[in-house]
Image (cartoon, rainbow, N blue to C red):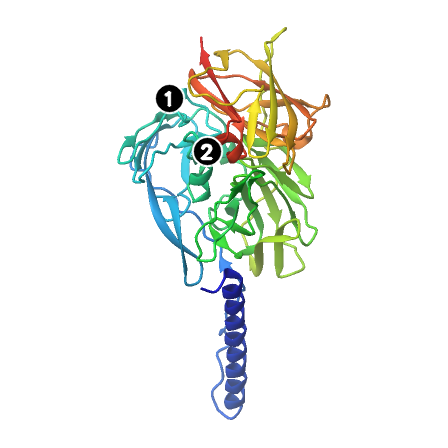
């Protein structure tokens, strides 16, 4: 079988042959029409030809409950097949489909009931990344769903508008299950988001972007390739499961909800025309005011919401880049869009209260290649590493010693069941983009990040490096929250 590079080259050649054929046909038609009494209608247009593939937009999962105060969702975890490249079939995993999952829309104050059915031949879980809820509904390794069985978590949404996500979290198996496609987005809305005149038309000017790097074998299957250094970086980037994606946008402000859904790789995004991003949100919701950003660094698990103003760009194409890699091409149509804005003020972020002499806990992150420890310990399902009082604010000090045989040297530290606030980075005030609510924070080698954390729900929760192969190989701990 020809390799994927060859197939993509042949596809490109076919594209140009079709393009030239169409041009010759149109020229011939014009010569013929010169000798005819009829003329082409003035309204006739020729759709422009686009390189690449239309960006897939995740479907909205239907709420099965007519009561607006209650939402009932059904998720089926299943095996699927995708043609990421024409004529080449890849075995995948997905929720309610072949790859990735649908979007779950929720509102603050809403009762959420989910029925998860595991149609795989192995155990899985569904973790609600960024959601504040009880330990029994968290979906960590202590809530396994065996093959053929169902899991029915219920919780009330009690946090601000935000972009969250869900993915599997079985012990030692999180990395491969996410790699093969198990991930989906959650949008939370509230009165604050309702009252902001920002882009909200899903799939038109409010666009989800799940960015993942992947490797493929010669026969088109996913190549989940581990070595002593970790997961081998992918040479293909998927956006919402699309290879070489493009998106047509109107001349308007467009909201991008970015998730770094990769297992191991960090990205630094920028636009090729030098246009700035206007960041409006981080992991846990809106910032107090928009930030003008030239680029966005995102570690695995982090989310960022930005607005890009396409209303006055001077070119037809704008490309979202990660370094020299083209992530997503925007084709800007000569069509006026909706009248939205970038507000001067987005929300008021309540400060997590901190009493005098708070409990302070230290977490030291260290790895050697694919293996890692926190405070010198490898994860043990039977060991409770920390006991945390319910409702009390603590200071968690996160230090990274980096790792041997590893690039990058840092670690994204994720805490289940809460949204925290960054107090300091290396003894200094955190940068503006880290002053909203966070659930995942990147700590580079030699750095120290201090966060304020408070838990509103009881139960057993995890903290871990969100480089999933580090998590699977021991770089995780667990804690109990109780009164």
Left or right? Give the position of 392 relative to 319. Answer: left
Q: Which mark is residue 103?
A: none
Please tell me how crowded label 1 is: few (under 14), some (14-19), or many (20+) other residues with Cα within 10 Å: some
| Residue situated furthest top in the rendering | 357
User: Compared with residue 41, is residue 330 higher up or lower down, i.e. above or below?
Assistant: above
Quarter location, residue 118: top left
Quarter location, residue 438: top right
Q: Secondary structure at mark 1?
A: helix
Quarter location, residue 302: top right
Q: Secondary structure at mark 2?
A: strand
Q: Is 198 or 463 nearer to us in this picture?
A: 463
User: Compared with residue 34, is residue 328 higher up or lower down, i.e. above or below?
Assistant: above
In the image, residue 411 lies at what x, y percent? 60, 31
Query: Residue at 29% of width from left, 37% of height from top?
Result: 64
Marks 2 and 1 sit apart, C-alpha to C-alpha, by 21 Å
Q: Does residue 384 appear in the picture of this structure?
A: yes
Q: Is 217 or 21 nearer to us in this picture?
A: 217
Q: Return the residue at label 2.
A: 188
Sequence-wise, which precedes: disc 2 or disc 1?
Answer: 1
| Residue situated furthest front in the rendering | 228
Q: Return the residue at label 1.
A: 136
User: Compared with residue 24, is residue 132 higher up or lower down, i.e. above or below?
Assistant: above
In the image, residue 168 lies at what x, y percent? 41, 34
Q: Is 245 or 313 nearer to us in this picture?
A: 245
Q: Is 79 or 129 nearer to us in this picture?
A: 79
Q: Does residue 46 appear in the picture of this structure?
A: no
User: Compared with residue 187, is residue 328 higher up or lower down, i.e. above or below?
Assistant: below
């Amino acid at each position: 079988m020809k390799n994927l590079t060859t197939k993509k080259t042949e596809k490109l050649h076919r594209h140009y042959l079709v393009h030239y054929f169409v041009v010759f046909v149109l020229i011939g038609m014009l010569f013929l029409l010169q000798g005819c009494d009829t003329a082409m209608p003035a309204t006739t247009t020729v759709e422009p030809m686009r390189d690449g593939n239309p960006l897939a937009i995740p479907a909205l999962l239907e709420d099965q409950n007519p009561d607006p105060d209650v939402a009932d969702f059904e998720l089926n975890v299943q095996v699927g097949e995708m043609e990421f490249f024409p004529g080449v079939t890849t075995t995948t995993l997905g929720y309610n489909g072949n790859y990735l999952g649908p979007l779950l829309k929720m509102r603050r104050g809403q009762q959420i009931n989910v029925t998860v059915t595991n149609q795989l031949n192995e155990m899985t879980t569904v973790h609600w990344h960024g959601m504040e809820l009880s330990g029994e509904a968290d979906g960590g390794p202590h809530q396994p769903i065996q093959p053929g069985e169902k899991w029915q978590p219920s919780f009330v949404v009690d946090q601000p508008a935000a972009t969250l996500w869900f993915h599997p979290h079985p012990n030692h198996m999180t990395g491969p299950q996410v790699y093969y496609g198990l991930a989906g987005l959650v949008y939370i809305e509230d009165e604050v988001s309702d009252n902001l005149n920002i882009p909200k038309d899903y799939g038109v000017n409010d666009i989800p972007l799940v960015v993942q790097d992947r490797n493929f074998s010669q026969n088109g299957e996913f190549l989940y390739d581990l070595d002593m250094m970790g997961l081998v970086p992918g040479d293909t980037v998927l956006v919402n499961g699309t290879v070489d994606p493009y998106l047509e946008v109107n001349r308007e402000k467009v909201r991008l909800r970015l998730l770094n859904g990769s297992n191991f790789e960090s990205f630094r995004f920028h636009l090729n025309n030098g246009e700035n991003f206007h960041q409006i949100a981080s992991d846990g919701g809106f910032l107090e005011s928009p930030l003008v950003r030239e680029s966005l660094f995102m570690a695995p698990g982090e989310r960022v919401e930005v607005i890009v103003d396409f209303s006055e760009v001077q070119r037809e194409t704008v490309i979202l880049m990660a370094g020299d890699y083209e992530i997503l091409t925007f084709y800007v149509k000569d069509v006026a869009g909706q009248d939205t804005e970038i507000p001067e003020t987005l929300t008021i972020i309540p400060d997590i209260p901190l009493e005098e002499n708070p409990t302070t806990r230290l977490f030291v992150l260290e790895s050697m290649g694919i293996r890692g420890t926190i405070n010198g310990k490898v994860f043990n399902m039977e060991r409770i590493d920390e006991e945390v009082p319910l409702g009390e604010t603590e200071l968690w000090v996160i230090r990274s010693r980096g790792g041997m045989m590893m690039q990058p040297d840092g670690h994204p530290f994720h805490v289940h069941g809460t949204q925290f606030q960054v107090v300091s980075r290396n003894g200094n005030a955190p940068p503006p983009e880290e002053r909203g609510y966070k659930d995942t924070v990147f700590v580079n080698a030699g750095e120290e990040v201090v966060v304020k954390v408070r838990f509103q729900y009881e139960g057993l929760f995890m903290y871990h490096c969100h480089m999933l192969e580090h998590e699977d190989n021991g770089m995780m701990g667990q804690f109990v929250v109780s009164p």
